């Protein structure tokens, strides 16, 4: 297999490092530029497409400066470039033979970073860069929906290339909950490697490959307890599975308990579907 596929979440380290090294050039234009890398997804300034930070997407001068910074300082510029070039360093892939997927959330700051990084990687020789937009997780209430989206997108990417290309994940950048889930799902689906590199490291680290598996039958049995319903009364649930397994499911985060009712975590159905295809 001569081709390689890299999957990299996108975070905001490019904005943070740019502010540290060159932000003064734009402070008169964007007085809150120093805060952009730390804005939460639910900050009004960061809400796509109307947040005030999003106007920078149309600022050619700023985008050019970010691209110039990323291509000039390479690994030092941000976690995305550091991790992707780290994978290349370990395995020796040619950028021209590598398909790079950038997973970014639909917020102003990560959209700016992704927009600039597409151009940065192009300048670094990666001619096939595909941005993948995620709605992201703006609150605890959206966490399960966000995980379903990550499961769907990552499994689709891996499924379309598995068996034809070597597949690697850059676990360095991005929102940590999403990046961790990307890494776990990727290992579950059998990628060829997950690479992490801290900004203080001289070398990338290839995380140990631990084959993961899911007891699909157990999950299907759990799904059957709900019988197509969104929730069941806690007494009926305990009667169906016994109290010990109820505690086990709850502690493993497979179910949620709301007052007197038990709900299945929404991403379980998606996980069952993915795991079944993998088998």
Image (cartoon, rainbow, N blue to C red):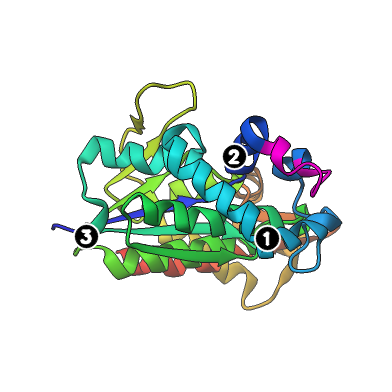
Q: Which of marks 3 and 2 is nearer the N terminus?
A: 2
Q: Which of 29 and 90 is in front in this view?
A: 29
- Does 24 lie within the magenta span? yes
Q: Give the range drawn in magenta.
A: 23-33
Considering only vertical position in the picture, is 38 above or below 141?
above
Q: Residue 181: x percent and y percent?
A: 52, 49
Q: Is mark 1 on a helix, strand or loop?
A: loop
Q: Check contact, mark 3 vs mark 2: CB within 8 A.
A: no
Give residue 225's quadrant in the image.
Answer: bottom right
Q: Residue 21: x percent and y percent?
A: 62, 31
Q: Name the residue under label 2.
A: 13
Give residue 196's quadrant in the image.
Answer: top left
Q: Earlier in the sequence, mark 3 or mark 1?
A: 1
Q: Is residue 114 visible?
A: yes
> Mark 1: few, some, or many residues within 10 Å (few <14, many ≥20)?
few
Residue at image coords 73%, 69%: 231
Query: How many tags in the picture?
Result: 3
Viewer-side label of 1, 2: 1
Q: Residue 53: x percent and y percent?
A: 77, 56
Q: Is mark 2 on a helix, strand or loop?
A: helix
Q: Is mark 3 on a helix, strand or loop?
A: loop
- Between the C-alphas of marks 3 and 1, the distance is 37 Å
Query: Residue 165: which numbered mark, if any?
Result: 3
> Mark 2: few, some, or many residues within 10 Å (few <14, many ≥20)?
some
Q: Nearer the viewer, residue 226 or 6?
A: 6
């Amino acid at each position: 297999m001569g081709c390689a596929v890299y999957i990299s979440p996108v975070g905001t380290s490019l904005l943070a490092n740019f502010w540290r090294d060159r932000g003064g050039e734009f402070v008169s234009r964007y007085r809150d530029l120093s805060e952009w890398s730390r804005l939460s997804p639910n900050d009004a300034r960061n809400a796509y497409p109307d947040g005030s930070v999003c106007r920078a997407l149309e600022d050619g001068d700023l985008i050019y400066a970010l691209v110039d910074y990323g291509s000039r300082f390479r690994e030092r510029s941000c976690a995305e470039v550091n991790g992707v070039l780290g994978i290349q360093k370990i395995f020796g892939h040619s950028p021209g033979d590598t398909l790079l997927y950038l997973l970014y959330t639909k917020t102003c700051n990560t959209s700016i970073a992704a927009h600039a990084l597409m151009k940065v990687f192009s300048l670094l020789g990666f001619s096939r860069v595909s941005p993948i937009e995620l709605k992201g997780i703006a609150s605890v209430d959206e966490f399960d929906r966000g995980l379903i989206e990550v499961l769907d997108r990552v499994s689709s990417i891996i499924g379309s290339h598995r068996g034809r290309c070597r597949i690697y994940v850059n676990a360095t950048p991005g929102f940590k909950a999403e990046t961790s889930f990307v890494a776990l799902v990727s290992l579950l689906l059998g990628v060829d490697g997950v690479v992490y590199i801290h900004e203080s490291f001289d070398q990338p680290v290839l995380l140990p490959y631990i084959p993961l598996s899911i007891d699909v039958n157990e999950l299907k049995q759990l799904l059957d307890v709900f019988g197509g319903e969104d929730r069941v009364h806690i007494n009926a649930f305990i009667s169906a599975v016994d109290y010990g397994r109820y505690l086990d499911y709850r502690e493993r985060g497979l179910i949620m308990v709301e007052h007197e009712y038990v709900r299945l975590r929404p991403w379980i159905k998606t996980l069952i579907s993915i795991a079944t295809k993998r088998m």
